[in-house]
Amino acid sequence: MGRYYSGDIEGKFWFGIQASNDADFFGSEGHCSFLQYHFDDSQIKDVEEGITKCKRELMGWVRKLDKFFKDNAGYNDGMLMKSLGTKDKRENQHLLEWYARLLLGRKILKCLKESEYCSFEAEV
């Protein structure tokens, strides 16, 4: 069983990696037992800044992570360490936390650029 978000964008939070309130990072706070997020086109700059922070934190790992997840339907620490050349589970955890956040930010930004508004609920 996983935790999902749905609305203008949909997806599943990464198990053990990504908190339900991860979209708070991009400038809108969730509310209630379901976190409700509402973004409008006035927040595009905030979302873009959040994406930039994610990329800065990932320092060149984005392409490797994009390729890894394009080529693999699932993962474990051993697969990541072998493919990415990481040294331990903590490093993987750190990279995955920021990568999951980056993917969420990309979805929010795409939705805003296509619709000028992005609203979704996230399970807590």
Image (cartoon, helix red, strand yellow):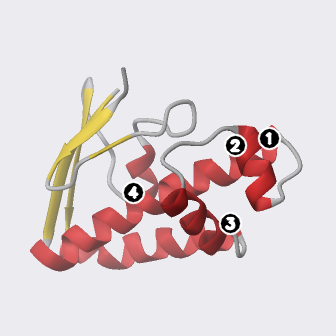
Mark found first going from the N terminus, 3 or 4 = 3
- Quadrant containing the N terminus is top left
- Quadrant containing the C terminus is top left
Residue 73 image point, x, y percent = 48, 47
Residue that appears at 40% across and 63% down? 105
| Secondary structure category for the residue under label 1 | helix
- The mark lying in front, picked from 3 and 2, is 2
Is 19 placed left or right of 117 in the picture? right
Q: Number of labelled discs?
A: 4
Q: How far apart in space, not on screen, are marks 2 and 1 (Cα)? A: 5 Å
Disc 2 residue crowd, few under 14, some 14–19, many 20+, Cα 10 Å: some
Q: How far apart in space, not on screen, are marks 3 and 2 (Cα)? A: 13 Å
Q: Residue furthest right?
A: 87
Residue that appears at 26% across and 35% down? 31
Residue type at tag 3: Glu
Query: Which residue occupies the foreground of this view, 108 or 96?
Result: 96
Residue type at tag 1: Arg
| Secondary structure category for the residue under label 3 | helix
Residue type at tag 4: Leu
Q: Which mark is residue 90?
A: 1
Q: Which residue is mark 2?
A: 93
Q: Which residue is mark 3?
A: 57
Q: Which residue is mark 4?
A: 104
Query: Which residue occupies the foreground of this view, 65 or 124?
Result: 65
Q: Is residue 18 above or below residue 42?
A: above
